[in-house]
Amino acid sequence: MAEFDAVIRGGVVIDGTRLPRYRADVGVKDGRIAEIGKLKSHQAKRVIDAGGLNVAPGFVDLHTHYDAQLFWDPYCTISSWHGVTSVVIGNCGFGFAPVKPELRDRSMLTMTRTEAIPYASMKAGLPWDWITYPEFLDSVDRRPKGINLLPFVPMAPVMTWVMGLDDAKSGRLPTDAETKEMCRLINEAMDRGACGWSAQRFGRNSVQADFDGTPMVTDLMHDETALALANVLGERNQGFIQMSYIPDASKYEGDIQDHTEHHFEELALAAGRPILYNAIAVNDAHPERFRRQLRWIESCAKRGIRVYGQSATLEVGFLFTFKDWNLWDDMPEWREVTTGPLEDRLMKLSDPERRPSLRKVDEMTGLITNNVRDIFVLECKEPALKKYESQTIGEIAVRENKHPVDAMLDIACADGLNAEFYTPPINLRGDYLKEMVTSPGMAIFGVSDGGAHTKFFSGGRYSTEALIKMGRDNDILPLEEIHFRLSAHPAMCAGFRKRGTLVEGNWADIVTYDLDKLEIKPLEIVHDFPGGEWRRVQRSAGYQTMMVNGEVTFDDNRCTGATPGCLLRHGG
C-alpha cells in the first residue's frame, strides 16, 4: 500500500514561514502534508516531478466577490489560474443572504453597479435555494468547489433583513431592538461557520453606489452600530472584520483621516480581533497618502492594536465604456448621468447644460485616474470616429479646442456609448511600491476584487504579478517574504486553520512553478458567464501544478476537473 497519495519530488520548498528555501520532497496523504524530506518514489501513488521548480503554499486572497460566480464557476477564475487556493467571500458588506424571496431580484440589481456583476448572469446562475444565512452556507457547501471559501457575514443584507430596505437605506440609527437582532444574526451565522462581518461605509456620496445611484445600505451605517457589531466578535473571541470607510465630513470636525484611524482602533479594541483596513494604494502623484496610512498601521502594531492594512499591489488600468462605467460615483453629478436606461444615459451625457458640473471630475484625484487628459481612446464602433483610436483625451482636446471631459463625452455619445476607453495605471513607480511593501506596517497583499468589475480589469492576477514584479524582475522582496505575504500572512489574519504554510500536518494547498517562466497572458474577452454575458480575463503561464486539499486542480495550466475545495466553516 502506498505511503503517500502524491510526492512532489525534487523542488525547492519555500514554505511561507520566512525560513530560507530548501530542496526537499513533499509527501501528501489524505489531503494533508504528511512528510517533508527525502522521500522514495515507490512510496507514492503519483509522483510530481518538481525538479527546477519552486514549491510553495497556495495563495490566500482575503478580498473577493465570488459570492455569485462560485455557483457557476467552481474554480473562481481568474484567481485559481494564478495560484490562489483559498478566498474570502462576502466582502464590503455585500452578498446574497439573508434575503427574503421578494427581495431577491433587488439584491441582484444592487450588485450590478457597486461590483459590476452582470444581472443576466446572476439571474441565470444563482440557484436561490436559501433564505437565511445558514441556508446560504449549506447551499455553498453542496456545490462542487475547486477552491476553498471562507465566508464573511455581509452587513447590507443583514441590515435590510432587520430594518426593511427603505429604512435601511434612509440612514436612520437602528433601534436598540434592531441592533440586538443584527447581533443575533451575526452570532447565528458565526455559529454555523462565518468568519466575521464586513461593511463598505462611504457615506451619501459613495464611490460605489447602488444600481439606482443611491448609497448602499452599509454606506449609511452609524459608528454606534459598527461598535455594537464589533462587540459580538469580542464576546465570542472569534472572527475578524473587513471594512472600507470614508467618514461624512459634515459630521466631524478636524481631519477626516484622524477620525477614520480613531474609529478603526475603537472597533479593533472592542472586538479584540483583527480588522482589515481597505485599502492602502500607491498614487504616484500623491505619495503622502500611502505613507500616512502606513505610519498609522505601524503605530497600531506598536500599541498592540490589531488593525491590518490591505494593500493594492497591482498596476491597475481600467477598460470601460459609458454603458457600464460607475467608478466616479462619489460625484453626484456623475452618478445622475450614468444611471437609468441606456437611452436616458445617452441623453444626459449629451446634454450641454450638464457638462459644466461633469467637468469637475478633472479636478479629482483618486484610485482610478489623476487626470481625464491621460485616458486613451481604445476603440470606436462608428467608422467616422476611428481617427481617435490610440490617442489620449488630452491630445484630442487640444486639437479640437475642447475641455477634456467634453472631448471624451462627445466621442462616447457619438458612438452610442460603445466607445472603449482606457485609464492607465497611476501606481507605476517601483520605488513607491517597494516603500509600501517593505514598510514595518507590513500591508497584506491583495484587494483583487476577484469576481467583480470583470469588464473593467483583472485583479485576480495579483499573485503572479507580485512574484514577477517583486521577486524576479526587481529587487524588492526575497521570495521567502513574498510567499509569507501571499499565503501565511493573510491566512493568520483571517483565521484559516492549518493553511498558508508548507509544514507537516497542514492541508496540502500547494503551487509549483518556474519563476523564470511565470507570465501573465494578455487581456482577452471570453463569453463564459451565464445569461450570454462576457468578461475580461488574463491567464497565466509558468505554473506546473496547483493542488487543493491534496488533489491537483490544474496540471500545466489545464484544469483537471477535480473539485476538492471546501467551505471553511470557522476557518477549518
Image (tube, helix red, strand yellow):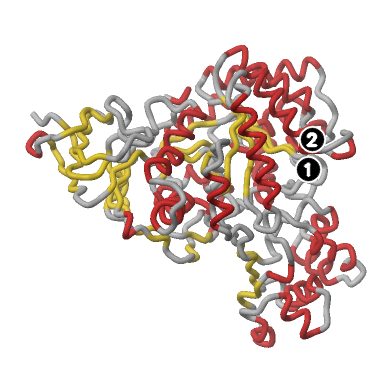
Side (left or right) of 251 relative to 548:
right
x%, y% of residue 542? 32, 57
Residue positioned 65% across, 75% down in the render: 377
Determine the residue positioned at 83% across, 74% down: 403
Q: Is residue 54 above or below residue 516?
A: above
Tell me which amino acid carries mark 2: Leu
Vertical arrangement, residue 103 with respect to residue 379, above or below? above
Asked whether the beta carbons under mark 2 and mark 1 sit within 8 Å of each other, the answer is: yes
Percent coordinates x, y for residue 490 in the rendering: 48, 34
Q: Closer to the camera, 114 or 508?
A: 508
Q: Which residue is mark 2?
A: 220
Q: Position of residue 448 (x, y in %)?
A: 54, 47
The image quarter containing residue 40 is: top left
For residue 325, what is the image quadrant?
bottom right
Quadrant showing the C terminus: top left
How crowded pointer 2 is (Cα within 10 Å; few <14, some 14-19, many 20+) is rated as: many
Secondary-structure class at tag 1: loop
Residue 215: mark:
1
Three-letter residue code for mark 1? Pro
